[in-house]
Amino acid sequence: MRSPLTLIFVGLLACGSKTAPDTAPAPAPDTAPAPDTAPAPDTAPAPDTAPDTASAPDTAPDTASAAAPPVLAANGLPADFVARLEDNKVGCIGISKNGKSLLVLGDDHGDRILNEVDVTNRELSEVALTPPPLSDPEVVKRLRRQGYVLCRSAEAAGDKTIAIPKSVPIVVRAADTHRFEVGMAGNMPASLSVGGELGYTLRRAYWNESIGPIVVVYEPLNGADGEDEYAFVAPYTLGESACAQRLTSGKALAKVAPPAFEPVKAGKSCVAMTADGRSAALDTFYKTRMPDGSRGDHAPTGIHWYGPGPAPAIDLECMERGCSAEQKAALVVEAAKLGLVGCSEARGKIALDGYEVPFMYKDMQLQLKTPTGWRVVQRMRAGNDGDGHEELWKLFQHPMGGPVFVLVGNQDTDREESLVYALDNIALNLCPKTASDVLAVSEVKASSSAKDGGGYKFGADNVSDDDLTTAWQPAASTPTEPAWIELVLPAEATVRTLRIGNGFQRKDGNGDLFTMNARAAELTVTFSDGTNEKLTFDGARPGMVELPLPAPKRTTSVKFTLGALHPGSRWPNDVALSELQLVGAP
């Protein structure tokens, strides 16, 4: 795929984009979902199932979403777009490929008004219409310059859910009056937060089957004055796996011992941890009714243990008000017997898989810096008053890793409450670890890499990031100059098996990129001594393919050279490899 669309959220509107021309040989997904073969954990968020009653697009029957993109027609504009413009029907007509504008036909007391919605500036500009609509060459030139394609639409079912029947179905749902979610089954949904005191009602969505963003349309609640608002969602943002990708490189953890246990007054904080960091005691307070609206069955103000397993048999309650000298001495002795340690506060980074991982707390969400960027791994609950005044007080973790203990508090006017989240790897929605028999790679070399664009990166390192939703794409590969990619080992090792993720194994707002892009039909594998093996693939099956070598091979590198291809349905020659793993022993 080549130079896909670039769309980012700015005030819920996309700004700045890079359009792939119609003749471009590569895909331009706006969002890319996780592969079918790597299901998300049970706890991972996924969009609601689309209701059976969801309305079909205004401009096409239910089956139209699977149709091939229309050929260019009148005056260089797509035929179905021209037909939609000429039928004089009020509503969305076209969406620009670069995601910057919508073309909307309005009704002003019987007169048709054609408006362009400027996404960047949230402004309307009128486009002159003279009958017949495309008789003015300047209007045609303007529309062609924007690269408009047919705008399809679907209405919200009960103001709560919209089903978008693209080739890879997308669901929009109203999480509440200030937040909408757009997502695909098995993937992390994109969350759209909208302002305004009264909140908003979900109305409809606009999209094009083959390219461009998803446009969510909403309006103010309670009849408040104001026109429709638009939120643009880049397709590539919808392709994120529901589980968060683990780091495979970064700053290694320095070996640091936790502080010693001290029986001092806590002050709404962590007071003790088990030596392995799996459980922690925190001083908290609670309301009669818990912040999630349910009856709270926790004890009121006091020190309580959180985390897996039974709580250590030690009474720390005196620390909440201040222990006497005798109580302190007894606690020190008892804590030593149980192996308790003090609490380490995490400041900006947590320990994960032997690496330092940056985190931030924003909009009641805990986010981690993953290989694919900042990622929401935990959403916190709203407070008693429903206005979400919670803020992160402190975050604790053993310096060498383990569960993360998040202390979230709310001290709003007449309310005082606190919550503790004990987050292990499952609660953080972390993807499973790579198999321990996969050899570490010190360097990845390639003949070339396609230019990054539209939110996608196509560099060679993608084949060793343990993520099937990223891929390497060469700039070109021909029979006379085939592209290649090489894994370099830190030292000579024995390779017994090759694990290969063929193709671009993502699904997103543009469709299934595995079938839309080319896949390898043949690969020649060359070892550091010059010997080689030829591999063939059927090209129809995503996921990791495991290929044992005829005999174990000692080598310092393994080079993969592309041969024949299985052509892509949309970008026939844009070949991709998602993952390459070498299985063996150092």
Image (cartoon, helix red, strand yellow):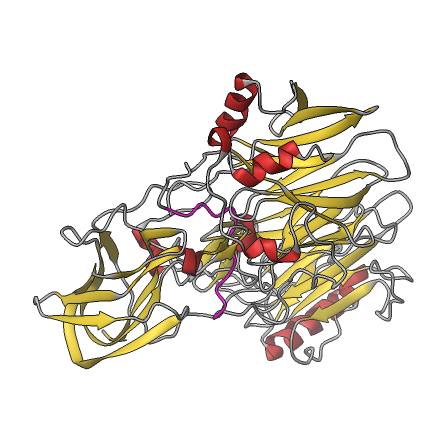
Residue 104 vertical position relative to residue 299 in the rendered view, above or below: above
Q: Give the range drawn in magenta.
A: 26-37
35 in magenta: yes
Dominant SS of magenta comes to loop
User: Does residue 373 belong to the magenta stretch?
Assistant: no
Of 496 and 337, which appears nearest the observer? 496
Quadrant in the picture for the C terminus: bottom left
Q: In which quarter of the image is residue 526?
A: bottom left
Q: Where is residue 91 in the image (x, y as percent from the top left)?
A: 72, 36
Query: Between residues 408 and 148, which one lies in front from this camera angle?
Result: 148
Residue 443 in the figure: left or right of residue 257: left
Q: Which residue is drawn at 17% across and 54% down?
A: 479
Residue 203 placement (x, y as % from top left) = 77, 44
> From this viewpoint, is residue 127 visible?
no
State the image coordinates of residue 389 (x, y, percent, origin top left): 79, 46
Task: Say which quarter of the image contains residue 291.
Answer: bottom right
User: Where in the figure is residue 392, as x and y percent of width and height?
Assistant: 69, 49
Check the image and report above or below for 372 versus 403. Answer: above
Which residue occupies the foreground of this view, 447 or 366?
Answer: 447
Q: Identify the residue at horizontal 85%, vertical 44% (top origin).
A: 412
